[in-house]
Image (tube, grey):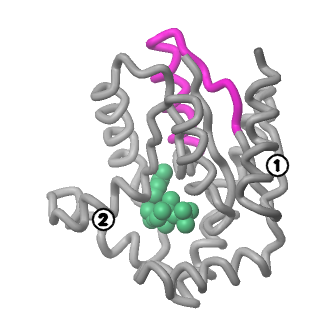
Amino acid sequence: MLNLIFFGPPGVGKGTQASKAAKHYNLIHVSTGDILREEIRLETELGIKVKDVIASGELVPDKYLIELLENTCEKHKGAQGFVFDGFPRTLRQAEALEEMMERTNCKVAKVISLEVPAEELVRRLVNRAIEQGRTDDTADVIKNRLVVYQKHTEPLIDFYKKRDVFVVIPGEGTIDDIFAAICNVIDNRY
Ligand code: ADP
C-alpha cells in the first residue's frame, strides 16, 4: 500500500498535484474539502452542520472529519493506497490517521509539503474564488484561512518530521515540473 499526504496552506496547489498523483499511482484521492462541499451541495445532515463553518474559513470539528475519513477508507478497502489532500489539518486528526493506519498495519509513506511565498498564495486564492465561485474565498475569509492554517495545521510539520516522512517541494513553476519533482520523491522510495 502507498499512502501519501499532500500538505500545505490553502492555495498552494495541493488539490491539483494530489489528483495527478492519485491517477499516476492508481490511488484513491481523498480531498476532504471536495467531500465536504459535496455534502453541502446535497444538503446532507453533515453538509447542513458544516456549511457556515466552511464559509467562515474555520475548521470543521475533528470528530466529523475523523468519522468521514474512517468511512471513506472503509469504502475503498481493497485500494492500493490513498492520497490525502486537506487532511490531516490538526494534531488530533494526524493522531487519528496514525491509529487508523496502525490498525490495518499501514503507514504514511510521505508527506509532500508544497511551499510558495505568502503573496503568491493570496493571489492564487483570489483568482480561484473568481474562477470557481468558491464562497469561502473572499478576502477576509482568505486571511482567516491562512491564520487558521498557521495556528492549527503548521504544528503538524514537526509531527511528521519526527516520523521522518516530511518532504518539501517548491510549489512554483509549471504544474508538470512540480509533479515531476513529486514523482522523484515518491519513486526514490523504492
Ligand atoms: P484548500 O484546498 O483551499 O486548502 P479545502 O478545499 O481543502 O481548502 O477545504 C475547504 C474547507 O473545508 C476548509 O477551510 C475547512 O473549513 C474545511 N475542511 C477541509 N478539510 C478539513 C479538515 N481536515 N479539518 C477541518 N476542516 C476541513
Q: Residue at 73% x, 35% y: name it.
A: 160
Which quarter of the picture shows residue 174? bottom right
* Magenta range: 91-111
Q: Which residue is mark 2?
A: 50
**Mark 1 nearby-residue class (10 Å; few <14, some 14–19, many ≥20):** some
Residue 130 picture location, percent across and down: 50, 87
> What crowding class fits label 2: few (fewer than 14 Cα within 10 Å), some (14-19), or many (20 or more)?
many
Residue 54 placement: quadrant: bottom left
Residue marked by disc 1: 169
Please tell me which residue is depicted at 51% across the width and 20% down the height of the picture.
Answer: 101
Residue at 65% x, 72% y is 146
Give the residue type at disc 1: Ile
- Distance between the alpha carbons at the discs numbered 1 and 2: 31 Å
- Callout 2: SS: helix
Q: Amino acid at mark 2?
A: Val
Quarter where residue 151 is shown: bottom right
Name the one closer to the observer, 162 or 24. 24
Ligand 1 contact, mark 2 (Cβ < 8 Å): yes
Pointer 1 with pointer 2, Cβ within 8 A: no
- In this view, the residue in front, 68 or 92, is 68
Above or below, 1 against 16 in this view is above
